Image (cartoon, rainbow, N blue to C red):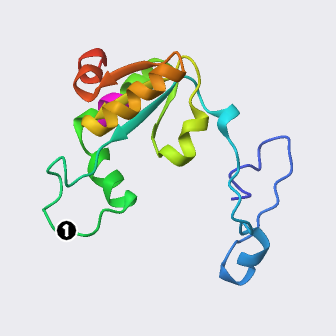
Amino acid sequence: MSDIWADYAFDVDTHILDQEILSKYRWHTDTNIDFTDYLARPVVFFLVDDLEKLGLMKIGETDTSSEKLRTVIRDMKPYIAAASYALEKEGCVQFFAKPVDTGRVRDGDIVVYVGQDSEKAARALEHMYDVEVLSAKEVRKKSKF
């Protein structure tokens, strides 16, 4: 690593971070870092109903973790279109988790929904903020993707 930066006018000090020193660089609190003010705006919030309701999981399948949801949705064209739309607007895209992200919404953001429950949540945000609300189908049409 030091060789890569050797030609530059600053010093480089390289350290290996491994399990033995994990306690020295690991986050030691349950308090999240508030990065709201540093998000690229507009944020395209992506709201998705439950996978089972959308037919993306089998009835009775129990793994409805948010990580599985994200894995399935990220490979779908609506999410890719939302990410492309965010890029076109010089913003960013992120999944919307109501308890955490409601306070991150700002005027000028964009809310993309998939499903009836998500549409209700998006419309509620529209009553609180000056946001653009789009269905996944609409964002696919608007995006250059």
Q: Position of residue 63 (x, y in %)?
A: 28, 68
Q: Is residue 59 left or right of residue 126?
A: left
Classify the position of the C terminus by image quarter.
top left
**Count of numbered labels shown in the rendering:** 1
- Horizontal and vertical percent position of residue 108: 54, 17
| Residue pictured at 35% horizontal, 51% vertical | 70
**Front position in the image: 42 or 107:** 107
In the image, the segment drawn in magenta is: 79-83
Dominant secondary structure of the magenta stretch? helix
The one of 58 and 35 positioned closer to us in this rendering: 58
- Position in image of residue 44 (x %, y %): 45, 29
Identified by mark 1, the residue type is Glu
Q: x and y percent of residue 95 in the render?
A: 43, 42
Q: In the image, what residue occupies the spot 74% across and 58% down? A: 2
Relative to residue 79, is residue 90 depicted above or below? above
Residue 8 highlighted magenta (yes or no) = no
Residue 13 vs 21, above or below: the answer is above
Q: Is residue 91 above or below residue 1?
A: above
Residue at the (69%, 64%) spot, across then down: 30
Tell me the element at label 1: loop
Residue 59 horizontal side relative to residue 25, left or right: left
Q: Looking at the rendering, in which quadrant would you find the N terminus?
A: bottom right
Q: Residue at x 30, y 39 (%)?
A: 117
The quarter of the displayed image where residue 142 is located: top left
Q: Give whichever of 9, 28 is nearer the camera.
A: 28
Left or right placement of residue 63 versus residue 17 in this view:
left
Residue nearer the viewer, 30 or 124: 124
Near mark 1 (Cα within 10 A), the count class, few <14, some 14-19 or many ≥20, is few
The residue that disc 1 covers is: 61
